[in-house]
Image (cartoon, rainbow, N blue to C red):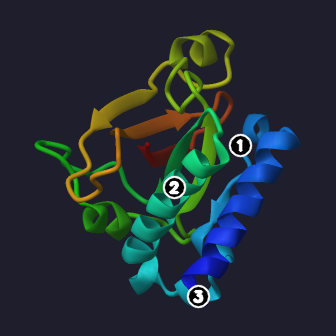
Amino acid sequence: MKSEDRIRLIEAWMRQVSQDGGIERYDDFHIDDIDPDWEARNSWADASLWAFDAALEARDKLKLPCTVGLGMSLCSDELDFGDGVSMAALVSQVDWSPPSLYLFRRGQEPGSDLDSAIQSGYIGTDTVSVEFRVLDVPAAKTGLFLRFRRNGSDEYTNSAFILG
């Protein structure tokens, strides 16, 4: 698929979610929905970087007052965040679902109000939030790892977001 076609798809998705409540619903755009060639796991790191950078440019072009996020559902919470994490290290921990683009209202990014989510009973009190530096994504403002359990569940969710 041509880059221009991918960009058009990303821009159309951004327009839609910014106008129809998709931001509040956390509507995402999986990278393999942008380009079917990106279904293969071995393409996810490069495809995610391309999609994230393209989404940042599209956001600025469309003048949307939003944060762009690249979200990944992780198999494990065994990452060493030390001095930062590479995209390859993150993608190596991604579960079966390809990474996705998100739009967030500024100030409402993932992890921005964990105290409220815990107090409301939506997630467990043992929720973990760790900010990290993304080593090879210059446009990233920050990375965020979240490990949480929805109340009433024994299963934990491990997610990483790159925000820009």
What amino acid is labelled 1 in the image? Tyr
- Image depth: mark 2 or mark 1 in front: 2
Mark identifier at residue 140:
none
- State which quadrant residue 32 falls in: bottom right
- In the picture as drawn, the residue positioned furthest to the left comes out as 83
Mark identifier at residue 26:
1
CA–CA distance in space, label 3 to label 1: 27 Å
- Image depth: mark 3 or mark 1 in front: 3
25 is higher (above) or lower (below) than 151: below
Which quadrant of the rendered structure holds the C terminus? top left
Read off the residue under disc 2. 57
155 is higher (above) or lower (below) than 72: above
Read off the residue under disc 3. 2
> Residue at (45%, 75%) from the top-left corner?
47
Q: Position of residue 55 (x, y in %)?
A: 55, 57
> Residue at (63%, 66%) from the top-left corner?
30
Q: Which element type, helix, strand or loop, lies under badge 3? A: loop
Q: Position of residue 83 (x, y in %)?
A: 11, 43
| 1, 92: nearer the viewer | 1
Mark 1 closeness class: few <14, some 14–19, many ≥20 residues within 10 Å: few
Q: Which element type, helix, strand or loop, lies under badge 2? A: helix
